[in-house]
Image (spheres, grey):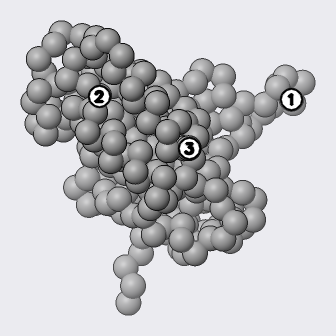
Amino acid sequence: MIAELKIAYEGEEAKRAVHYFVGTSVLAVAFKDVHNACAAVKEEEVDYAVLPIETSKMGSIYVNYDLLLNYNLHIIGEYDQQEILTPEQKTNSSSYTRFLLLSKKLNLAWDIKLTGVVFKTSFVFGFKNSTNNGMLSRVLAVFSQQDVDLIKIESRPWNHQASISHEYPEMRTNKYQYLFIADVLGHLTDAKVSAAIRRLNELCAFVRILGSYAILWSGEVITEKSCRASIVEY
């Protein structure tokens, strides 16, 4: 008998997003906060977690990016979910939240069976000294040289995330350090993307791949992967 997949989530909006990520029956496991949901993935109490990462009104949810780093999780899917509006709100523009499907393992084969889907690769990088003149410009030039489209880049203060402190002790040498969160078009297995990442590893103190995954799953993909989810709470 095949074991039932378990997906962790926190909150009603995340529970809605759970239904758009997998194509078999799953057990949707409710947690009281996103920290516990991510910890459950790391400890293999559940298979995946659904986590909000960005809203159309407020932008990136940086504390949740920190969770990806602290728990060393990987992105294997995303879904752009529209907010449910009341009749009074429907006169205003719609609001969207981008949810990520997270795994303990980097699964580059998750979306291989889907054809005609555009992929993005997300990663985080940092320098030994964030104030080094020209370092960020050199990194940005890598994508231009490899003809890779950089579609998002944001800086985030390095808050001594546990996993980075352990793996890259040289990052602890300065008071003011920044991480850079970036998305590029393409899959990590694409020649141009992999060449750009190799060059980044030469320039940066660290580079961590967060995942390669399909961009904002379409309605057809959602229909294909819709699931029947049981709900339990922790």
Which residue matches tag 1?
Answer: 90
Going by the numbered disc 3, the residue's amino acid type is Asp
Give the residue displayed 46% in from the left and 29% down from the top: 140
- Mark 2 and mark 1 lie on one chain; the one further toward the N terminus is 1
Location of residue 58 in the rendering, given as x and y in whole percent from the top left corner: 60, 21
User: Disc 1 residue type?
Assistant: Lys
Q: Position of residue 175 (x, y in %)?
A: 18, 9
Q: Nearer the viewer, residue 158 or 81?
A: 158
Spot occupied by residue 26 in the image (x, y as percentages of width and height) = 49, 69
- The residue nearer to you, when weighing 146 against 180, is 146
196 versus 156 height, above or below: below
Distance Cα–Cα, label 3 vs label 2: 22 Å
Cα–Cα gap, marks 2 and 1: 42 Å
Tell me the mark number nearer the camera, choosing from 2 and 1. Answer: 2
Q: Which residue is mark 3?
A: 147
Picture layout, residue 43 above or below residue 3: above
Q: How dense is the environment of label 1, judged by Cα within 10 Å: few (below 14), some, or many (20 and up)?
A: few
Residue that sits furthest to the bottom in the current view: 1
Q: Is residue 6 visible?
A: no
Is disc 1 placed on a helix, strand or loop?
helix
Quadrant in the picture for residue 113: bottom right
Residue to which mark 2 is pinned: 126
Residue at 41% of width from left, 75% of height from top?
4
Mark pair 3, 1: CA separation: 41 Å
